[in-house]
Image: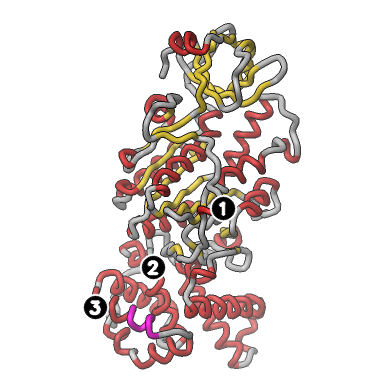
Amino acid sequence: MTDFDSYLAKTEEIGFVRQIVGSMIYAEGLPTAHPGEVVLFEFGGMGYVLGLTPVAVEILLLSAEDILVGTRIARTGSTLRIKTGKEYLGTILTSDILRNEVFIFNDDAKNHRPVDGVSTVFTDRKNITQPLETGVTVVDLLVPLGIGQRELIIGDRKTGKSNFLLQTIRTQVAKNCICIYATIAKPQLEIDRIIRFFKENNLMHRSVIVASNADHRAGLIYLTPYVAMTMAEHFRDKGENVILILDDLTTHARYYREIMLSAKRFPGRNSYPGDIFHIHARLLERAGNFQKGSLTCLPVGQSILGDLSGYVQTNLMSITDGHIFFDNDFFDQGRRPAINPFLSVTRVGEQTQTPLVQEIGRLMRSFLTQYDKVKQFKHFQSELNEKIRILFDMGDRTLAFLDQSAGAIVPLNCNLILYGALWSDFWKNVPIKDMKYQMNQLTKAYLEDKEFKQQADVLISQSDTIEKLKTLMKANRELLVHHVSQEKDRVTDAGVQGSI
């Protein structure tokens, strides 16, 4: 791979470094070089031909080695590829491993794929018909996802986006899904936190982490999502359900802008290059639901002060099948997760739901919209009529039902049981704090008690409408009472959710 002389003899072309601007190298020579081709430098290091001009070859540096003006360059005649295979499950692909073990440009190598692949043809795709369960109540009921969907996760920094993604990964790995997690120019501390989460929750055996931090070359950061997508495509073609996390594409766009400005490309809106939409669309179009397997992609975008109208943000929203918005105002109010269901969109998720879940979602959205309109009058509660006071009480209970800590996973059927109990007045006149504690008890029973889980699943299977569910919940009230403790010494809400 690093045998400069052999490739020089093979291609019989030589180039010389003429100028270095950041991660961009301008070379003279190499008359038949083509975009996407890998080149080698005389004293070690590799590059990626990004473009051609009448006077120079633009090369994106991928190695950590320092390159000097005058260094000789040899073509390899091959595009950049990576090795793929199940042996990479449980591994963390850092920049050193990518350069020395994963990146190849030998056309005879087995189990390899081009990094800059093309999307699968339309005839090999199929409709999205299966739901993707995240374990997060507000998403599974109000902003549902489907297996093979591309859903943008967007919001300000530190509003809980990563926590939601990790909850989703825990839920999907438990369902035997494969997870590919790409960290794009993240601080090393954040990367270590993600790796620790995977290891502590025994997720590594079904996962691959592609990690690039802010200290890496801009070229490697630019290629990170493409490497992760290529690795995910390998498992997809083996018939697996794959979930791909790209964290995050807003940072990726900034690094691509840096590269293009170094390459003296004409800047457009916000100084981004004109093809910024194309590089993300070409990447995300490779995900979907296919005849062999599925590739669900959850790219992450970053907003500033809750503004969704930014250039890159709107680009990503138009490419994907919807977005989940983490609202900074909701976060400041203490809502966890801080997902705004009114500004979140899912274009294909609802078609995967059962009629019962669809009806519950419509009912809850309608109720929350009504509650949101009148809650500004809450401080006049003593002067309001009984009907409005009941609305406020049920609104507060519904928000408590949707509240969920980062350590909690709630299966969909368990959510339906809890919602049916809530709307059948099981917790009428019970303080909200006590209600939330009892909900946590029922969730824990559903996860640990096989008999209760079976009985709950049967109730859901017999319910095709919310009215039927409420009737069955009232008739089986003792089933819930049996699993709700009446002890006065209760642990805190956060403590119970953390244990779940």
According to the picture, the residue beneath numbered tag 1 turns out to be 122
First reached walking from the N terminus: tag 1 or tag 2: 1
> Residue at the location (64% across, 30% down)?
258
**In this figure, which residue is indicated by the disc labeled 2?**
410
Label 2, residues with CA under 10 Å away: few <14, some 14-19, many ≥20: many
Q: Which mark is residue 451?
A: 3
> Residue at horizontal 68%, vertical 51%?
314
**Helix or strand or loop: what does disc 2 sit on?**
loop
Part of the protein shown in magenta: 457-462
Horizontal and vertical percent position of residue 343: 63, 64
User: Can residue 429 be spotted in the picture?
Assistant: no
Q: Nearer the viewer, residue 317 or 378?
A: 317
Judge by depth and name the residue closer to the eye, 409 or 20: 20
Vertical placement of 283 versus 457: above or below? above
The quadrant of the rendering that contains the C terminus is: bottom left
Q: Say whether residue 235 is magenta.
A: no
Q: Secondary structure at mark 1?
A: helix
Q: x and y percent of residue 52 in the render?
A: 66, 22
